[in-house]
């Protein structure tokens, strides 16, 4: 039995773009898993050589989504220093050593 036949016998319809309809008690459950607008933040996978070329283009004044992605800072762009880690660990240690009130 094909998957299409299996689903149709049970009243389940799946269309492309993904629209799923499942028969329920009283009313059907409908889920739209398709994305009509596209992803707002498209991520580009660029090789290191391509990244280098894109950065050179940016130096010459060109703008593109790929250049924006490469030059955008994220939470890992500015990692903590060893001193910051030590301070954070000391703070956690002090908090755990304080007697808890009953």
Image: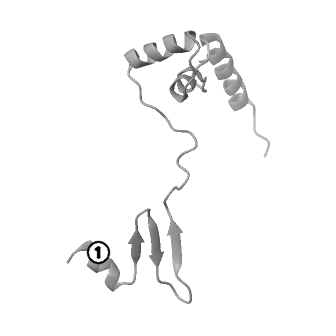
**x then y, percent, for residue 86:** 63, 15
Where does residue 78 sit, x and y in percent of width and height?
61, 18
- In front here: 92 or 99? 92
| Crowd rating for badge 1 (residues with CA inside 10 Å; few <14, some 14–19, many 20+) | few
Furthest residue in direction right, as rendered: 101
Q: Which residue is mark 1?
A: 4
Q: Quadrant of the N terminus?
A: bottom left
Q: Out of 63 and 46, give the one closest to the viewer.
A: 63
**17 to 90, vertically: above or below:** below
The residue sitting at 47% across, 83% down in the picture is 23
Residue 97, given in percent of the width and then of the height, sits at: 70, 29
* Residue under the image location 75 percent in, 39 percent down: 100
Left or right of 21: which side holds 68? right
Q: Which of the 4 image quarters holds residue 99?
A: top right
At a point 44% along the width and 62% down the height, the residue shown is 17
Q: Is residue 32 above or below residue 99?
A: below
Residue 26 is situated, as x and y percent measured from the top left of the image, at 56, 89
Residue 51 vs residue 99, the one in the foreground: 51
């Amino acid at each position: 039995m094909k998957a299409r036949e299996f689903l149709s016998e049970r009243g389940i319809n799946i269309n492309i773009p993904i629209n799923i309809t499942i028969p329920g008690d009283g009313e059907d459950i409908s889920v739209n898993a398709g994305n009509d607008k596209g992803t707002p933040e498209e991520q580009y996978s660029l090789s290191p050589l391509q990244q280098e070329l894109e950065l050179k283009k940016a130096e010459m004044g060109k703008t593109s989504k790929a250049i924006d992605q490469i030059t955008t800072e994220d939470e890992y762009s500015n990692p903590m220093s060893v001193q910051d880690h030590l301070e954070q660990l000391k703070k956690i240690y002090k908090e755990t050593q304080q007697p808890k009130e009953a």
